[in-house]
Amino acid sequence: MGSSVERYGVRKGAWTTEEDFLLRKCIEKYGEGKWHQVPVRAGLRRCRKSCRLRWLNYLHPDIKRGEFKSDEIDLIIRLHKLLGNKWSLIAGRIPGRTANDIKNYWNSHLSEKLAARSDMEKGKCITMNNQDKSITMKNKVIKPQPWTFSSNSKWLRCPVNATPQETVSNLIPKSPPEESILWWKSLLVEDGEEDKGTSCSGSGTGGELDAAFVLQGFEGEGEWDNLLMNGNFWDLLGTEQKPII
DNA sequence: AAAAGATTCAACCGCCTGTAT
DNA sequence: TATACAGGCGGTTGAATCTTT
């Protein structure tokens, strides 16, 4: 992929520093969006998608470089447990990291290791070392089965400055079926511990205990709404909202 | 030092969704 | 309602780099 390929006058492959400069200048002048116009405005022989991707994944000023910190890794694992391969949603909750970054990190650092550990240590709390980073987690992966939704669904994409309540309102359909409730409970509370109010898996940011506690005695449809609207959903994950890149 | 294998990650591809006409 | 187009996403690829033998 290193060598550029030109087909129908459109360049492909790795971006040059000159192309980066042109794209950056263009975005500074015209702002983000209208990607179909960017190649012309910037004087680039790149397709709109290539320009957008280069900006969002590499040139955007808010992008954080360097290794993932332990808290970021912990958050990725928990959000992945919650959302599955919804990388853009996960990235939206991890400041400075792009969906591509997280996807790559997951595929190269976490996916196979977690699967391998899961096979070896069923039912045990495990700790894995990744360079200096320590990941402690429960190995039981619960996939988000109850609801299927498109990554592009309007109700799934919450606004940048949405409040937690608004975000939850966008994310969660009203009055979920019983199996959905059970799934959420299983996500937040360890097996056999629903009645004790003990904390769930993860390295422990304090939010889990609250989540487990809140979910106790929660069964009905009305209470579901109350939980989502009155509680801070992202506190349950031990994170907070951030501006989405 | 060199070859082979493993890993990383930027970039591409195809598909889906939303919107305008 | 149907169609076209743009934006956006997840899956995948493959060159570059690193590690091991």
Image (tube, coloured by chain):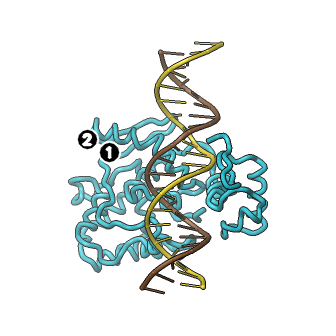
Chain colours: A cyan, B yellow, C brown
Please state, as top left, top right, bottom left or bottom right, where the N terminus of chain A lies in the image: top right
Q: Which amino acid type corresponds to the residue marked 2 in the rendered image?
A: Lys
Query: Residue A10, image x and y in percent?
Result: 68, 54
CA gap between label 1 and label 2 equals 7 Å
Q: Secondary structure at mark 2?
A: loop
Q: In this orientation, which residue lies closer to the viewer: A208 or A164?
A: A164
Residue A181, numbered label: none
**Dot 2, how many residues are within 10 Å of its Cα: few (below 14), some (14-19), or many (20+)?**
few
Q: With respect to residue A153, does A120 lie above or below?
A: above
Q: Using the rendered image of the protein, determine whether residue A63 is visible from the camera's viewpoint.
A: yes
Q: Identify the residue at image location x=30%, y=54%.
A: A142
Q: Secondary structure at mark 1?
A: loop
Q: In this orientation, which residue lies closer to the viewer: A106 or C6?
A: C6
Q: Which amino acid type corresponds to the residue marked 1 in the rendered image?
A: Asn
Quarter location, residue A200: bottom left
Residue A139, numbered label: 1
Q: Identify the residue at image location x=68%, y=49%.
A: A6
Q: With respect to residue A21, does A242 lie above or below?
A: below
Q: Is residue B13 left or right of residue A176?
A: right
The disc numbered 1 marks a residue on which chain?
A
Q: Is residue A83 left or right of residue A120?
A: right
Query: Residue C2, image x and y in percent?
Result: 45, 81
Q: How many marks?
A: 2
- Contact check, label 1 and label 2, Cβ < 8 Å: yes
Residue at the spot of label 2: A122
Q: In this orientation, which residue lies closer to the viewer: A188 or A109?
A: A109
Q: Is residue A241 left or right of residue A174?
A: right
Q: Identify the residue at image location x=69%, y=51%.
A: A11
The disc numbered 2 marks a residue on which chain?
A
Q: Identify the residue at image location x=31%, y=63%.
A: A184
Q: Earlier in the sequence, mark 1 or mark 2?
A: 2
